[in-house]
Amino acid sequence: MAFFLTVLAVWGSMHLYVFLRVWAYTGVPARYAAMAAPVWVLLMFSPMLGLMLERSGHPAAARVLGVPGMIWAGAFFLLFSVSVLHDFYNGVLTVASFAVPALGRARLMGARPVLAEAGLVALITLYSMVEARMVGIEHVVIPTSKLPPGHQRIRIAQITDVHLGLAVGRSRLERIAGLIKSAQPDIIVSTGDLVDSTLHGSESTASVLAQMQAPLGKFAVTGNHEYYAGLPQALEFTRQAGLQMLMNQTQRITEGLTIAGFDDPTAAGIGQAPPWDEEKILQGADQGDFVLVLKHRPPREPDALPLRDLQLSGHTHRGQIFPFSIIIRLYYEYPAGLVQTAPGHYLYTSRGTGTWGPPMRFLNPPEVTVVDLVPAQ
């Protein structure tokens, strides 16, 4: 409850700030501002109301209110960011004008700059909704001296952060599955947050993934949203999709290749799993095997990871909507892409395959990752 109230207070403060500054810049009469205030409050609460409707078993009503609410949330964040930059610019010039009065005339005042901001945000929002559907293949090549005997290449298809729910449904998943099928992978993996919320008609959606073929297996690990959505439901959906859930365990899937999967830390945080020792679990891999690790969150500071030849992660979305990408980069040293943590040891963090919250991506398209393990030269 305390966390919810904190989020509500921050979200409400952001809305109050933007509302008051628009009123101040445009000079709209108080009576019109009072008429607009209830609409502003409804927009502020619409994402939360949509989520409540969905969890209470009203998916149709949730889509009507929740999806537009999520779009508003993304657009509002962009508007808030532009507003802060605008006011910072004006503030700097106001202070500087005490020394150089002419600088005060360079401030952007009045209704026109605010209308221009709103137009810019509207255009970015529309583009971001299109970009969110522009899922493509990101191809990564990992050279290794541990390639299993009899294989000239092992291909892994990774999806992560699909967030199936209100905004991402069967049609998007079919597009994702088509890209995976075209890659003809040997292994298919989901590195968490496959589901986002209550899934109505989950068997139909899961069948899209169940039809995909991978000769060496299809595997998944939990992300934080599997626990938010309800772990039993998420596990059942994963089973219907034909994916084997790896929960703090290793499995040798062919000679020379071991796969390991770890739960998201949310499991321990909410008491659904006791703490686990990843390094001890990884010691169960056969000596000399290539060890592929699936873990939803990348390490914040990836140092040498001697028991992981390749770790595949997600979670960060690389920020999803700029300028969130700046915030993510401040928290994670390697928020997306491939990094060699030590000679012969790699970490790859996907940008994500779907969207969380706003069905938008800005300067950050979604991806299906295709990883080729090839012989080191």
Image (cartoon, helix red, strand yellow):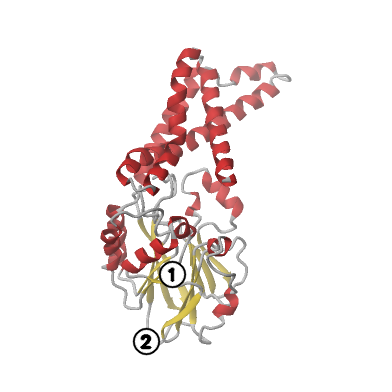
| Structural distance between the alpha carbons of marks 2 and 1 | 19 Å
Q: Residues within 10 Å of mark 2 (few under 14, many from 20)?
A: few
Task: Answer with left or right where residue 186 lies relative to residue 285.
Answer: left
Position of 3 relative to 297 (above/below): above
**Tag 2's secondary structure?**
loop
2 and 1 marks in contact (CB < 8 Å): no
Query: Residue at coordinates 43% horizontally, 66% vertically from top-left?
Result: 140
- Taking depth in this image into account, of 302 and 259 the one nearest to the observer is 259
**Would you name the residue on which mark 2 appears?**
150
- Residue 306, image x, y percentages: 59, 76
At label 1, the amino acid type is Val
Dot 2 or dot 1, earlier in sequence = 1
In the image, residue 238 lies at what x, y percent?
A: 36, 66
- Residue at image mark 1: 141
Question: Is 31 above or below relative to 372?
Answer: above
Image spot of residue 270 (x, y percent): 55, 60
Camera-side residue of 148 and 100: 148
Q: Where does the image place residue 176, in percent across and percent down from the top left?
A: 32, 59
Q: Is residue 123 left or right of residue 308?
A: left
User: Residue 373, can we see it?
Assistant: yes
Quadrant position of residue 109? top right
Q: Which mark is residue 353?
A: none
Q: Amino acid at mark 2?
A: Gly
